[in-house]
Structure formats: C-alpha cells, structure tokens
Image (cartoon, grey):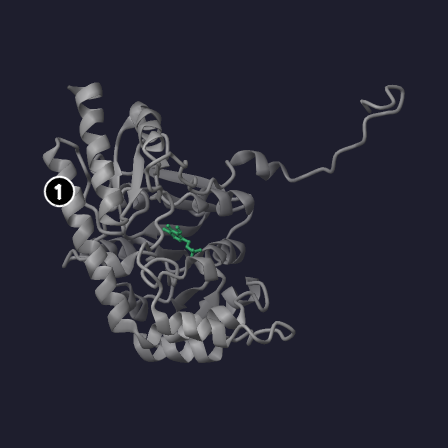
Amino acid sequence: MNAENPSSPAPSTPRLRTALDTFPPYIPGKPPRQVDGLRSFKLSSNENFLPPLPAVLEAMVAHATDPAHYPDDAALTLREGLADRLGVGNDELAVTTGASELLVALTQITSDASTAAIYPWPSFEMYPQTTGLAGSARIEVPLTADGRHDLPAMARAITDRTSLIILCSPNNPTGPVLTDAEVRAFLDEVPDHVLVALDEAYWEFATDPDRVRGLELVKDHPNLVLLRTFSKAHGLAGLRVGYAVAHPQVITGLLKAVIPFGVTDLSQAAAVESLKHWDEVLERARLIAATRDDFAQALREQGWDVPEAQANFVWLPLGEKSSAFEDACVEQAVAVRNLGVGVRISIGEDEALDRVLDIAQTFRAEHFG
Ligand SMILES: Cc1ncc(COP(=O)(O)O)c(C=O)c1O
C-alpha cells in the first residue's frame, strides 16, 4: 500500500534469492560506549592494538599520490615479497581484499545448490554467510566442550555432495589451534576432489609447539588452500589485504572469482613494507601472545573456564550470561564481542585488560558466587 495515495498498488519489491533467508547477516564488532572519566577500548574485532610500524605508514603516504590509476591487478611486488618469505612460487599465491574476499571466492569456485560445505561451529561468522550465499548445504559440526574442532565428526560428515571443508586454526572465537598430526590424519580421510581451506588468519600468534604448519602441508596436498591476512599480526585491517597459498591450479581458479583491482596500490605498498619488517611483526605477535597468556591465566585464577587461547583473543563460554557480561563491559566503556554462546575479548592495552579482569571478578561474584 502506498501511504501517500492509498488507492495506488504497493510498489513491487525486487525478487531476491531465497538463499538470503538461510543465514544471518555478518555483524561486526561494536564500538565502545563513551563513559565520562573512562578511556574507552574496542576489544570486539580482534584488531592489533599496537601502533603501526612507522616505515609502513611512510610507505602508505608515499603511495597516496596516484588515485587516477588502477593498482597492479597481479600484485606482483607483493607476491614476490610473499614468495620470498614463505618459500613458495609466485604462482602459488593470490592476493585479495582481506581473507574475507578469499572466503567468498573459494565458495564461488566450489559451491552451489548441489554441493555441501562442512565447517566447525562456532567459528568465523563469514563461513555460514559465504557458503549460504552460494546456496550450498551447510554442515556445521559442533566444537568439542573445550572449544576445539571435532575432526572425526567432520570426517564422518563428508558425503558425495561435499565440495568444501573449512578449518580454522587458531579457531575464532574459541582460540585453540589444530595440531599438525590431527590435520594430517584428517586430510588422509578427505577425498582428493574436496577443497580444504585452512583459515590461518591468526597463525602468527600461535605458540603451541604442536600447532598445524599449513605451509608444509600445502606442499603435499593439492586440495589444500591456506587463508592468511595482513589484518591481524601486521596491524593493517583497515587496508584490506589477504592472501591464499595453494597449488597453482587452485590459485588460477581463485583468481577467476576475485574482484579485479581490489587491493589498492597504497595497501599493496603497506603490505610490501610490512613484509620487509617480518621479524618485527613476528616479535610483536609474540608480545601479544605473552600478554594473552597472562590474561587467560588471570581469568583462570578467578575461576573461569578459558579454553586454550592461541590467537589475539580469549573466549569466555558464558552461555546465557553472555549478554549480561557484555553489558557489564559496555558500562565500563569496553566493547567485547558477544556471540550468544560466549564472549570473545581481544587482547588490548594493559589498562583495557586490567579493567576487564576487574569486571570479570565482580561478575563472577554476582552471578556465580
Ligand atoms: C578466522 C578469520 N578468518 C578470516 C578473517 C578475515 O580477515 P580479513 O578479511 O580482515 O583479512 C577474519 C577476521 O576477523 C577471521 O577472524
């Protein structure tokens, strides 16, 4: 019904795909509330809280001069830098607008209404979005009680329809890594024609000596693709640069599905410069990992059941108390990520983490005391 002229028919709405009704929209981490007298902290998006490396900022400024031209679509300098660092060939790399674009492209090249995708749950919220958008059946395999992938159950879920399996190590939002041995055993059970995406967005923060080593695995498995990003350890989330490592045949397929000229010249230059400071980037990731370990330990000492934390965040499996905990943080000018079944807290400055520890202690006394 047209409100201004009740006699005219209602304007017809465009017919959108029914697949859109099968998954929720992506909900980004909220900004913190401003509270008088308190510095506010955003611990809701797993961003890097450390200041950017000065040389990276300089590279960005130097490359902010030529917006009239398209960037290098092949991202050749960046791929050469990555190839050098990672010991792979240029043809085994694709550079995209964040690992997010890779997830979309990977789904595009594997999935449609006739196929099924398997992934752990809870895990990264883009998995249901991108596979759901493709119209693919979605098999969400529940994590174990300690927040880890249930790989035997994932292997049992494989059928003739399976075209894509996503693994996430360390897992967002719960934190544990997959071990090298368990992924090798899992891959032995996956048929060669099924593409396995190992999402390593947080690999630089993982310190568990048994953690999966994607780069070594990908050499032996033509159906494996690694997803990585400059958003987390490199602290370049705002510039949108991610990359895939896989066999050339998979890369060629992926490149057909990515948006041309997606990664700007400025973003490529920043990523190239950041790669030149690789040791510093890894050292900063280790510092964040040490802070994470202390923070997780302090929460455990308060009595919280914190799963193994291997990325730049810690998970509190709060169940139905998740919203109450989020609200307690909001009141103290801290934004955390409430995922309904638990709350994810990104590692930030000491002042932010100390405040969360105080909130957590009071919350325990009030709700579990
Ligand atoms: C597990 C995981 N994969 C992929 C991404 C996407 O990262 P980006 O698109 O910023 O590279 C994220 C971002 O939070 C993530 O947590």
Q: Position of residue 316 (x, y in %)?
A: 25, 35
Q: Which residue is painted at 51% across and 51% down in the image?
A: 111
Q: In the rendered view of the protein, which quadrant contains the N terminus?
A: top right
Q: Is residue 319 left or right of residue 6?
A: left
Image: 280 above or below 205: below
Asked whether the viewer can see residue 131, the reply is: yes
The one of 57 and 251 positioned closer to us in this rendering: 57
Secondary structure under the numbered disc 1 in the rendered image = helix
Q: Nearer the viewer, residue 332 or 11?
A: 332
Comparing 47 with 132, the one in front is 47
Residue 268 left/right relative to 327: right
What is the quadrant of residue 231 in the picture?
A: bottom left
Identify the image quadrant of the C terminus.
top left
Pointer 1 residue Cβ closer than 8 Å to ligand 1 = no
Q: Percent position (x, y) of residue 45?
A: 38, 46
Q: How many marks?
A: 1
Look at mark 1 in the image and give the residue it sits on: 297
Looking at this view, name the residue that lies furthest to the left: 301
- Residue type at mark 1: give it: Gln
Q: Quadrant of residue 125?
A: top left
